[in-house]
Amino acid sequence: LLIHNNALSSVLMGSHNGIEPEKVSLLYAGNGGFGAKHDWNATVGYKDQQGNNVATIINVHMKNGSGLVIVGGEKGINNPSFYLYKEDQLTGSQRALSQEEIRNKIDFMEFLAQNNAKLDNLSEKEKEKFRTEIKDFQKDSKAYLDALG
């Protein structure tokens, strides 16, 4: 698991020396949609040396564009994720995603989470189709969402 934000990384790993994070979910805390504040609830899942699941819940304060969001169910497609910034392929410069881009991505992550329970029942051909859809979304989310109507 790559954690882009060094400050966030030290917070997540501070009291868990030697235990690798299994899963990190950062969820927006605002109830009224996306606003001026950037408070996120972080749930960090670990496995201890005996293989038992250990969870830590922390609050983090992030500025838009400084880290990543990872969400997903326990089964099916694990931890679909995206960064909160975009890198220009030509110049290498970075810019924060717009609120609309973030909303679109989170909507898609919620769609994945809702459908994770069904993935175990899919055939390999159906699973491959679903993986292809995710790749298409990651390549060009606007075109993908436009195609969905």
Image: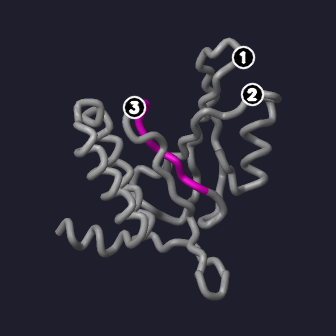
Report the residue marked by disc 3. Answer: 75
Q: Residue furthest left?
A: 149
Q: Is residue 35 left or right of residue 54?
A: left
Residue extending farthest to the front is: 125
Question: Which residue in the structure is indicated by mark 1?
Answer: 49
User: As shown in the figure, which amino acid type bears the numbered disc 3?
Assistant: Lys
Most frequent secondary structure within the magenta stretch: loop
Residue sitting at the far bottom: 91
Does 74 appear in magenta?
yes
Residue 104 visible, this angle: no
Q: Which residues are magenta?
A: 68-75
Amino acid type at circle 1 is: Gln
Residue under the point 31% across and 58% down:
133
Residue 19, labelled with which disc? 2
Per the model, the C-alpha gap separating discs 2 and 1 is 8 Å
Which of the two labelled residues, at mark 3 and mark 1, occupies the earlier sequence position?
1
Question: Residue 105 falls in which quadrant of the image?
Answer: bottom left
Label 2, secondary structure: give it.
loop
> Residue at image x 53%, y 65%?
36
- Residue 6 position within the rendered picture, expressed as x and y whole percent measured from the top left: 78, 54
* Secondary structure at numbered mark 1: loop
Q: Are marks 3 and 2 in contact (CB under 8 Å)?
A: no
Disc 2 to disc 1: CB gap under 8 Å: yes
Residue contact between numbered discs 3 and 1, judged by CB atoms under 8 Å: no
- The answer to whether residue 143 of the structure is visible from this angle is yes
